[in-house]
Every structure is written in C-alpha cells, then in structure tokens.
Image (tube, helix red, strand yellow):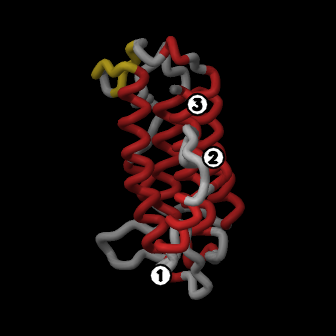
Amino acid sequence: MVTSYVNLFKYYKNLADKSMSHLSFKELQRQPNEQSNSISIIMKHIAGNMISRWTDIFTTDGEKSWRNRDGEFIDDFTSKDELLNYWEKGWKVLFDTLNSLKDSDLNSIIYIRNEGHKISEAIERQLAHYSYHIGQIVYVAKMYDTAWESLTIPLGKSETFNSEKFNKEKSVRHFTDNEDK
C-alpha cells in the first residue's frame, strides 16, 4: 500500500515537472491575475507544506511552529534554480518519510493541527491537496508553453490508445508503471 502511495505522488510530481520544464523563471513567477497564484508561489506552498507535514511525523504535529504558511504566498525567489531546489527539498522530505514507512504503520495515528489522522488518512489528505495544486500548475503552464505536449492521452488519440491497451493481455499492475498515459 505504501508503494502505491509513493507511485501516485511520483506520478503527480512528474506531471508538474514536465509542465514546468519549458517555462522561464519569469513565466513561473507570472500571476494570471491579482487573485491567482503564480506557479512559483504554488510550488513554494506545496514544498512548504511537505516539509512541515512530513518532518518527524511520529513525534511532532504536522503543522510545525516554525512553518510560515502565509510567507509561502510571497514569491521571494531570485532564480529558477533557487525555486527548483526548494521544490525538490519538499519532495525529498515527503519521499524519505514515505519510503521509511511500512504498510503496518498506516493505521498509526499522527496529528495535523492537533487533529488525529491515521497515517493512511494523512497521506490521502495530502495527495488530494498536492494533486489539486498540481492541476493548477499544469493549467497555467499550458497557457504559457507554446510548445505544449500532452501529458496524458492527446486529443484525437483516445481510440488508438484504447485499442493498444485492449490488444494486450489483462494484467494487474499500477497504472503508473512504465509511465503509461
């Protein structure tokens, strides 16, 4: 079960990474309007959340006293490298923690803002949160990237894709195996 969660997080990280790969630092920092966040801000928020939620999950609350959530919505990065390093730091904390878990840990209770969650529930909560924001990243990146390539099944290719799938033997595997779309 933990492996399945790890695969899903990797899948969503890959969607975000591919979406951002062709964008300049200026495009990553661009806000579509005053009420919207730039991709850079969304990345900072996701990474900040990951660092807080997944650091010392068995001994500290997931909402750390040192976290500055409001500061996550201020874009103070000075370079794309600085932004990407922070992004990767968040993912590293998440993956290091998840990879340290055993399936038997999933029913253990951890706390987020003093509310007890089974670890499986906390993982699902964060998976929904991160995929929500990654959807925002993909949407905004698609508006800016003139060389956009579909991250899933390209428009007009569903029939071909399904035909290829149904021409294979049935099998049980995770949909993210072999990076299938």
CA neighbours of label 3 inside 10 A, class few (<14), some (14 to 19), many (20+)? some
Amino acid at the residue labelled 3 = Thr
Check disc 2 and give the amino acid type: Asp
Residue 7 in which image quadrant: top right
Q: Quadrant of the C terminus?
A: bottom right
Q: Nearer the viewer, mark 1 or mark 3?
A: 1
Of 131 and 72, the residue lying toward us = 131
Position of 101 compared to 42: left or right? right
- Counting from the top left corner in percent of width and height, residue 82 is at 68, 58
Label 2 neighbour load within 10 Å: few <14, some 14-19, many 20+ = few
**Which residue has dot 3 on it?**
3
> Which residue position holds label 1?
156
Residue at figure coordinates x 59%, y 77% from the top left: 149
Identify the disc placed on residue 177. Answer: 2
Q: Secondary structure at mark 3?
A: helix
Q: Residue furthest right?
A: 81
Mark 3 vs 2, N-terminal side? 3
Circle nearer the N terminus (2, 1): 1
- Give above or below for 12 relative to 37: above
Q: Residues within 10 Å of mark 1 (few under 14, many from 20)?
A: few
- Report which quarter residue 180 is drawn in: bottom right
Label 2: which secondary element: helix
* Residue 9 percent location from the top left of the image: 54, 43
Residue 8 shows which numbered tag? Answer: none
Q: CA distance from mark 1 to mark 3?
A: 33 Å
Q: Image check: 43 left or right of 35?
A: right
The kind of residue on which mark 1 rests is: Gly
Q: Please identify the quarter of the rendering in which residue 99 is found.
A: top right
